Amino acid sequence: MRDYILKRLLQIIPTILMITLVVFAMMHTIPGDPIIALLGDAYSEEDAMQLRQAYGLDKLLVVQYVIWLGKLVRGDWGTSILTSRPVLQDVLLRLPVTVELIALAMAVALLIAIPAGIIAALRQNTWADYTAMTSALAGISIPDFFLGILLLLVFSFALQGLLPSSGWVYWPGTCPNLVCQESVWGNLRHALMPALALGVGRAAILTRLLRASMLEIIRMEYVTTARAKGLANTVVILKHALKNALIPTVTIMGLQVGFLIGGAIVIETLFALPGLGTYGINAIIARDYQQVQGFILLVALCFVGINFVVDLTYSLLDPRIRYST
Amino acid sequence: MAHIQPQTLDSSIPATTPLERPARQSAASASLYAQTMHRLQRSKTALFGLGLVLGLVLVAICADVLAPYSPILNDPAATFQPPSWQHVLGTDQFGRDMLSRIIYGSRISLAVGLSSVLLAVFIGVPFGLIAGFYGGTLDSIIMRAMDLILSFPVFLLAIVIMIMFTPTAGLIGAMKVILAIGIVRIPIYARLVRGSVLSIKEKEYVEACHALGQRDPLILFRHILPNCMTPIIVTGTLSIATAIIVEASLSFLGLGTQPPTPSWGWDLKANVSWIQMHPWLALGPGCAIFLTVLGFNLFGDGLRDALDPRLK
């Protein structure tokens, strides 16, 4: 297992380098000269040249990339033009909200998908199956942000503030500054609608997948053997069939993380959550490219990290993976 | 690669006249087509999806005739009008008719959905064909480039590309969105086709083509590509739905086509602040996205089942 983890970690290095290369290329293809923007009305050729030298912008692009990469490794992700604060510090403060949102959305997805997928498979071609599959198709087709708006209309407006329409209350002990509120109940109330909006679409995909896997597994000989041994149906389904049916589900869950990250950016904007998504979108609107760069880098690195964890989970569920790679 | 002697090959190939061969191929493909169409016609959900899609196409083509008002004309005297016979889906903060904006918005959604998938197919498929067919260094270079694109979450990369392009209004703005969504979806088709080619190129008829001295492009595009078409068609149809959602999400964040071009995502973004008092402002564009995506998903599912019933 240790060799497998090491091998996977080594494979991540070129991916991370590629990500930094794309982000660097993006920063250099954005229209407009940052030096002209920085100097504004006080622009003069002489000042511009001095600033270019000071920021190393007069060097070859390859040299600039190596210098920039060195700074990234040392934790210098630049300083925001808007807040004059270190970007790395800002993005790390925003990260827990996004991580909590994604984790809750995934929990919502699993809580819906596992029972729905099992029931749909066990009651194939009955009203329960049709209901689950029709709901799943609707869930896949509804955009996260439109579902979020519908939830807002019902739970915040029609039911007169049953759930808050925007803002965030931190989980106790996670508040990044002195002015925010902390409470378990408040946190869950604020997170419920965003997590539902984000999780329902994923639940729909996982339900369809789990139903297909369960249908295949429950017809296998070892399940028939387990039943022939006189085991209770619940034990056969939950202990013998579900574990194997979950293997493809975990793989797809990993692939869904990319969509969850994208969805989280939109949902955070809709519910005004203080996460990475709103940070990135506000930075894009304000054209603070140091912040934009930090946001994209951190999100992409988190994506790589999550895929790594999913790979490990997959190898734990199916040990053959370790030996075949 | 096994080399077949010309004599052996001659005796192994059934004697057919040039007239017989196309007739046989045509009969076989007609049969496959007929079977697929028959299965598709039996699927009520697929037909319902097709109906939704065709309805949307019709609305997009006839927008000039169907829309009761201009989608960009402001009317300060008629802001926030609730649904009525005059304005079936009400008006927005600028007094623009929501129904007209939704009707014209279908053009952007459909154009972006279809064009971005076609772009991804036209670039991704040849890459997948070449990577799978030639293998070796070429395969490694192409697939590492695809891995680079896949190392980013799809939506984040679309955002990055839109930042680089700078979002604008009109046709140019729509083309930028098409490029952004198309580029991020190229690896899907490259990987899909490469996987199919790896198994198809080992088949005997491909070896026979080599033995007959056919050139690689002919083998690739005439003999291998048609056998990869089923997954491409199915994935393509379902991808249109995803592309429409990505376009709407980009517009919702202000990174899609810019106003005054009508866009469902942008309308949702612009009206979200007013939905407590005027909920119809969100329901119209949201339902339009939902029904369009549902249509493509239903049709895509039906098409998949019809083309390969084993997947049902």
Image: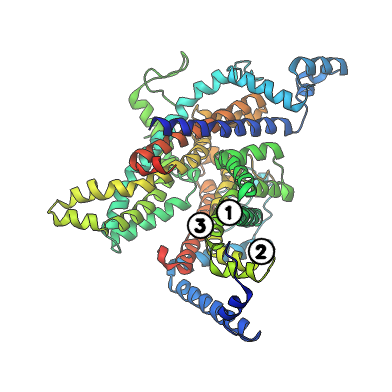
CA separation in Å, label 1 and label 2: 29 Å
**In terms of depth relative to the viewer, which is nearer, A117 or B95?**
A117
Mark 1 = which residue? Answer: B189
CA separation in Å, label 3 and label 2: 18 Å
> Which numbered dot is residue B85?
none
Mark 3 = which residue? Answer: B291
Residue A159 can be seen, yes or no: no
Q: Residue A54 lies in what quarter of the image?
A: top right
Residue at x 52%, y 44% (from the top left corner):
B278
**In terms of depth relative to the viewer, which is nearer, B267 or B161?**
B161
**In terms of depth relative to the viewer, which is nearer, A246 or B55?**
A246
Q: Is residue A232 above or below residue B154?
A: below
B172 relative position to B135: left or right: right
* Type of the residue with mark 2: Ile
Which chain does tag 3 point to?
Answer: B
In percent of width and height, residue A315 lies at: 38, 39
Q: Are marks 1 and 2 in contact (CB under 8 Å)?
A: no
Mark toward the viewer: 1 or 3: 1
Mark 2 = which residue? Answer: B61
Q: Earlier in the sequence, mark 1 or mark 3?
A: 1
Q: Which quadrant is home to the N terminus of chain A?
A: top left
In percent of width and height, residue A56 lies at: 75, 18
Q: Residue A171 lies in what quarter of the image?
A: top left
Residue at x 67%, y 48% (from the top left corner):
B179
Mark toward the viewer: 1 or 2: 1
Local packing at callout 3 (Cα closer than 10 Å; few below 14, some 14-19, many 20+) is: some
In percent of width and height, residue B187 lies at: 59, 48
* Type of the residue with mark 1: Tyr
